[in-house]
Image (spheres, rainbow, N blue to C red):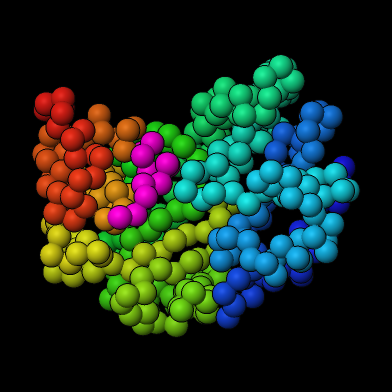
Amino acid sequence: MPDLQLALTDLRSALGDFLERHREDGVFHVQIGGPGSVPGLQDLDVPELHVDLLPGTVTAAQEQALRTLGYQPQGSHWHHSAGWRLILPNETTGWRADQHALTALLTADPEAAAQYGQVFRRDGREAADTIFRERATAHHARTIGFQRACAVAQLLAPLDPPWMFAGGMALDLHVGVVTRPHDDLDIIVPRDQQPELQQHLQHLGWRLDASVNRRYQPWVPPLNPPSFQVHARHLDLQEVVMLDLMLTDLSGGHWRYRRDPDVTLPLEQARLNGPYELPYLTPEAVLLFKAGRAGSPLRPKDQRDFVRLRPHLTAAQQTWLKDRLEGSVPGHSWIVQLNSSGDL
């Protein structure tokens, strides 16, 4: 098998490492994957490097750097003559997280790996990935589940603020089971408690970054609007890239929608408790974020989340979401589906 760790070092050197801070481009995240990286399946396909490269579209300079390293474009991917493939995942689809879960399944279960190989040889990579996606997700839910969320809760317990999970993890907590793997964990934290949160996390050895003018820099409170995100990383937090800490106005006992502060919910309604007493943002508010902005395309993974969660919403939750969408994203495709089957 080729030395992929050396390949990663070369990529960061040639393309730049975004995590070095104060740059607008470079390698943001990379992982080794693909069926060719699984023991027993090396003859099936070449191993892969899944690389998040900023600014998102390969620039002319980045293309030249890849060619200099020995990569050649092959369809939508890049192939290296030494025997591996570089893939730049589309973060809107959840593909990278799905692939990570699939690799974990095939590595842990030789029987599943053998069956996957049979489908791959008969029908191709895409068919094999599709057929085994549900099985990989079930394996992820069984082996990882809410472990990382519980670790985050333990991390934040000494602060005792009205923090809560958001994003896909919040939806899983509402359903009560992990329905898909997650690249990162979204956490809502009170904007007015930034100094305490930073001091606590730094003391425990966390790396904390804020993106200002499209460049990473060390997080120095206060981070003021319109900035709202802090990325937190720690080697102890496996299976996810980072914590995405979202600074939110939770003052006066209310949650306020960041895109429209006039949209509010009382905290006792907005902040629910799921398995293991893990707090999460109520799903209708999560889906309001996932619906996006007017004129912006809907991300495929957000569409799948909506389809999965709608049957778990009460009639009141559906009505609230429908009313907010009609006000902020008129004509959204979800509007006609909400409450279409009556009270749930």
Q: Is residue 72 left or right of residue 342?
A: right
Foreground residue, 260 or 330?
Answer: 330
Residue 214 forms part of the magenta stretch: no
Task: Say whether residue 202 is visible.
Answer: no
| In-front residue for pair 266/316 | 316
Q: Which sits in the foreground, 317 or 199?
A: 317
Q: Position of residue 65 (x, y in %)?
A: 76, 66
Residue visible at 78% across and 33% down in the picture:
45
230 or 196: nearer the eye? 230
Task: Indicate yes or no whether the magenta region holds residue 299.
Answer: yes
* Residue located 52% across and 76% down the image: 215
Q: Is residue 298 above or below residue 235?
A: above
Location of the C terminus (image quadrant):
top left
Q: Is residue 301 among what the camera can see?
A: yes
Task: Give the extent of the magenta segment.
Answer: 295-305
Q: Could you tell whether 213 is left or right of 327 in the image?
A: right
In-image side of 293 versus 40 (left or right): left
Dividing the image into 4 quarters, which one contains the N terminus?
A: top right
Q: Residue at x 61, y 57 (%)?
A: 52
User: Residue shown at 25%/65% (left/top)?
Assistant: 258
Quadrant in the picture for residue 37: top right
